[in-house]
Image (tube, rainbow, N blue to C red):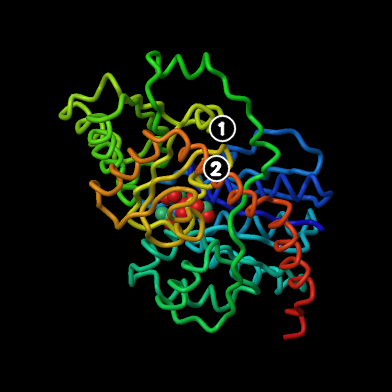
Amino acid sequence: MNIGMVCFPTYGGSGVVATELGIALANKGHKVHFMSYSQPFRLNIFNENLFYHEFNVNDYPLFDYQPYESVLASKIVDVAIYEQLDVLHVHYAIPHASVAYTAQQILLSKKIWLPYVTTLHGTDITLVGRDPAFEPVIRFSLNNSNAITSVSESLKKETLKTFKIDNKISVIPNFINVKDYDVKYDPCLKRKYASHGEKVMVHISNFRKVKRVQDVVHVFNEVKKQQACKLILVGDGPEKVNIEQLIRQLNLQHDVLMMGRVVDPKEILSIADLFILPSETESFGLSALEAMAMKVPVISTNSGGLPEVNIEGKTGFLSKVGDIDEMSANALILLKDKKKHELFSQQAFNQAKKFDIEKILPLYEKQYNLLLKTEGMKS
Ligand code: GMT
């Protein structure tokens, strides 16, 4: 099948999912055409079935805002015609669902039918999508998507509640490729970051407000009072300066490492004892799943789709948003009890295996096959 794939190339879960899905599809023999304004950050491998079509949104002094949507729609039309796309898969509803609709209409005028599936990732619905200014466009473009998938049951419910759309939403959870997570533990690497045998806590995100990275720092501050520990913060984003300030205020600068962005977090996760994700909302929590695939238990909030990934008392612990005391106490339970930690690590890995790409890829292929049966030309 010839599949067009549209995603944001920036540091974020939706781009990772699109890229890993594209790679897996290409490995199965499908031809996958990525369209983006820069190369998605994990799309850095050579594969004869993977294609990358870059487009430039040029600056023009008349515009305060550059017309991203128009350029992308034109790119989709071009790639669909010249690469003979069978289906289009757009990740993140805003603005990709309405761009896909526009491209589809243009192609229809040329008697070409290109069905598209929109995958909802989270903040496109829960944060950005709630802004009433977007409502008519999102509702229309979701109702006109030939298929919609959501990365969790929770996000599906939230979408139906917020937008009251008539279209069906199929849940296809996020995934990892378990085979890739067989990274050997390297004691030298651990010593580099925790030279006196301290425990290591890791957080990975794009440091947006919704991630509540300040809570990570507060939890770490509490944990450190009872357990020698280091914290590694991976990522970057708008809250970085405030987080740095808090770390200095609490005099934690010698125990917290701000590592910046890392393309592939497996090595860092291989030395982690705990992963912490205290998000305000989280439709799925792909970073938590990646940690679990590396046998790292998770301390998280119970918001959004996190309970579908992190299982209370089994793969980690879940607390109410902002409950620093409980998250700290739970972290200490796991860091202080070696046997319990080993059990949770194994259970985390077993849970991660349920989200292996081998189980999830056929669900997307089924969606694409259903799209092939749509008959827009006749409608
Ligand atoms: O985590 C982010 O803020 C990035 C965002 C994105 O759109 O790239 O992530 C969302 O999609 C991920 C992949 O499906 C999910 O694992 C994240 O839970 C979701 N983020 C939120 O809901 C806050």
Q: Which residue is mark 2?
A: 290
The label on residue 282 is none
The answer to whether the residues at label 1 and label 2 have Cβ atoms under 8 Å apart is yes
Classify mark 2: helix, strand or loop: helix
| Up/down of 155 relative to 79, above or below | below
Q: Is mark 1 within 8 Å of ligand 1?
A: no
Q: Is residue 334 left or right of residue 262?
A: left
**Which numbered dot is residue 266?**
1
| Mark 1 / mark 2, whichever is N-terminal | 1
The amino acid sitting under disc 2 is: Glu
Could you say which is closer to the camera, residue 129 or residue 267? Answer: 267
Work out whether 161 lies above or below 358: below
**Residue drawn 23% across the image and 36% down it:** 222
Quadrant in which the C terminus is drawn = bottom right
Q: Is residue 291 above or below residue 3?
A: above
Q: Is residue 163 above or below residue 285?
A: below
Side of 282 where 212 appears, left or right: left
Amino acid type at image mark 1: Lys
Ligand 1 within 8 angstroms of badge 2 C-beta? no
Nearer to me, 67 or 378? 378
For image coordinates 30% across by 57% down, the residue present is 320
Q: Position of residue 332 (x, y in %)?
A: 33, 38
In-image side of 114 versus 288 (left or right):
right
Residue 193 spot, x, y in % from top left: 42, 18
Q: Is residue 91 visible?
A: yes
Residue 190: x %, y % from top left:
48, 19
Rendered residue at 36%/33% (across/down): 336
